[in-house]
Amino acid sequence: MIAALVLSIALFLTSVGAHLSILGVGRRMLDARRDFSAKLAVVLLVLASHLLVATLFAAGFWLAAELDLGGFDKTPAMSAMDYFYFSLINVTTLGLGDIYPTEHLRVIAGVEALTGFALISCSAQLFWTMMKEGENA
């Protein structure tokens, strides 16, 4: 369980750091230009950031499974796409339940859902600011 918590914290910190850095780039882009193309670029940056977070957690799930911290209730065995799919569904807090973690991987899944909720909130705040500034321009 300790290994899963340590891995979860490392994934959380890496994901939050990367996401906030990418949002900072987007914010600077908006400060420089406030036209429609700049807003579209920011939207693409946010999408890329969320996909990066899902990829980081997918790699974390793979590593945890390799370290025998748990697995997934899925037959046949998990592929790279399965890890990414599960991570993407989990980080968005959608949680379809067609693939689910077992043992200590459940800790990582919980931390990923919390991470996703927090980062989606950060992205929403940037979108709100972007749209609010558009009204005042």
Image: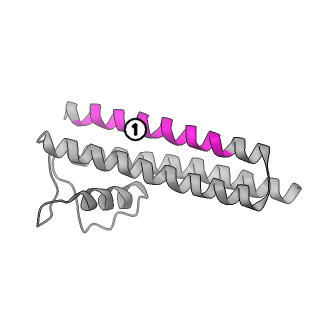
Find out whether residue 13 is within the magenta segment. Answer: yes
Mark 1: few, some, or many residues within 10 Å (few <14, many ≥20)? many
In the shown orientation, is residue 97 left or right of residue 42? left
Q: In which quarter of the image is the C terminus?
A: bottom right
* Coloring applied to the structure: one colour
Q: Can residue 69 be seen in this view?
A: no
Q: Position of residue 54 (x, y in %)?
A: 39, 52
- The quadrant of the picture occupied by the N terminus is top left
Query: Helix, strand, or loop for circle 1?
Result: helix
Identify which amino acid the numbered label 1 is placed on: Phe
Which residue does the numbered mark 1 point to in the structure image? 12
Residue 94 horizontal/vertical position (percent): 40, 64
Vertical arrangement, residue 98 with respect to residue 56, above or below: below
78 in magenta? no
Tally of numbered discs: 1
16 with respect to 97 (left or right): right
The part of the image, by quadrant, that contains residue 22 is top right
| Residue range of the region highlighted in magenta in the rendering | 4-26
Residue found at the very far right of the displayed protein: 137
> Compared to 59, does 73 lie above or below?
below
- Secondary structure of the magenta portion, mostly? helix
Residue in view at x 11 percent, y 42 percent? 68
The residue sitting at 33% across, 47% down in the picture is 57
The x and y percentages for residue 70 are 14, 47
Q: Residue at x 28, y 46 (%)?
A: 59
Q: Residue 112: percent from the left, percent from the top? A: 37, 47
